[in-house]
Amino acid sequence: MNDYDQISRKARTARRIRLTFTYALLAFWAVIVLFPFYWMILSSIKSYGSYNAEFTPKFFTTSPTLQNYKDAFTQVSLGRYFLNTFLFTVITTALMLAVIIFAAFAFSRLEFRGKNLVFTLFLSLMMIPSELVIITNFVTITNWGLRNTFTGLILPSVTSVFYIYLLKENFEQIPNDLYKAAKVDGTSDLKYLFKVMVPICSPTIVTVVILKVIECWNAYVWPRLITDDPNYFLVSNGISEIRENGFGRENIPAMMAAVVVISIPLIILFLIFHKKIMAGVSRGGTKG
């Protein structure tokens, strides 16, 4: 065996060792990350009696049951919470999409006095702590008499400085010569926006939609603050109502079943579109 073969063999051995160590570390980290989900599902299929009879937590069950999932829809208003969340998510996402598309187009293509200054001031809003914004929004919505209404829930969420910035960066990647050529042909700004820019930047727009859906589905602080009527509760803050007035504090398996049902839509959404999310964010952060 010559020196070249020995060096090649050592290189392959070192590579196998690195891959083995890397996969072992990733597997260990995956177990840590996924264990809470496993425990949530496991607890949801245990009966109330068997769960409370475990002096030492068991990592498996020999008598699974789906009764907790039945109770999640029959003993509490989980169906209503789902409907409220669906309406809130769809309406808020649609309105926000319209706002950020027009705002991003204005900042990226239109020319008007003080555009850069306005955009800088606009970005500075991201520096304001969210707690201060919540207080201001709460006072405004309360003074307008919109507490315990879908309008009050939706209004503070119909725009996002970050999403406008992300989409603006995407729009600016489209050559400006294309816009000038379209104007020479007599194309209106609105037609150019929806016929050219939106289709080209569709991966980022899809990403924004997915992220906004996740944000709306997980919304907790604002809906909990602005609504005290269970008829307007979303799934996130509905869980607190379920715990207090539904199953009770001791019925952990039924609570876990409700949490699993609430989590499934977002898990499925992420598994289907996770590549688009990463691709859209990467596209938005790259210029040139």
Image: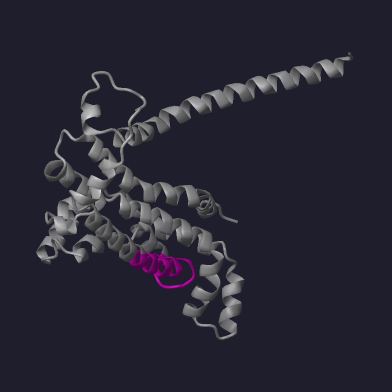
Instruction: Determine whether 79 is above or below 68 in the image.
Output: below
**How many marks do you count on the picture?**
0
- Rendering coords of residue 127 (x, y %): 31, 49
State which quarter of the image contains the C terminus: bottom right
Left or right of 233 on screen, residue 193 = right
Instruction: Determine whether 123 is above or below 112 in the image.
Output: above
Q: Nearer the viewer, residue 156 or 123?
A: 156
Which residue is located at x 63 percent, y 22 percent? 18
Q: Which residue, as the protein is rendered here, is positioned at the far front? A: 63
Q: Which color mode does the image show? A: one colour
Q: Which residue, as the protein is rendered here, is positioned at the far bottom? A: 186
Left or right of 6 on screen, residue 19 = left
- Rendering coords of residue 45 (x, y %): 31, 36
Residue 241 in view in this figure = yes
Q: Nearer the viewer, residue 40 or 23?
A: 40
Left or right of 230 on screen, residue 107 = right
Left or right of 50 on screen, residue 263 = right
Instruction: Give the quarter of the image for residue 69.
Output: top left
State which quarter of the image contains the N terminus: top right
Q: In the rendered structure, does residue 242 fall within the stretch colored magenta?
A: no
Which residue is located at x 21 percent, y 66 percent? 151
Q: Name the main secondary structure of what is drawn in magenta.
A: helix
Q: Nearer the viewer, residue 82 or 1?
A: 82
Which residue is located at x 13 percent, y 61 percent? 147
Q: Which residues are magenta?
A: 94-115
- Rendering coords of residue 140 (x, y %): 15, 61
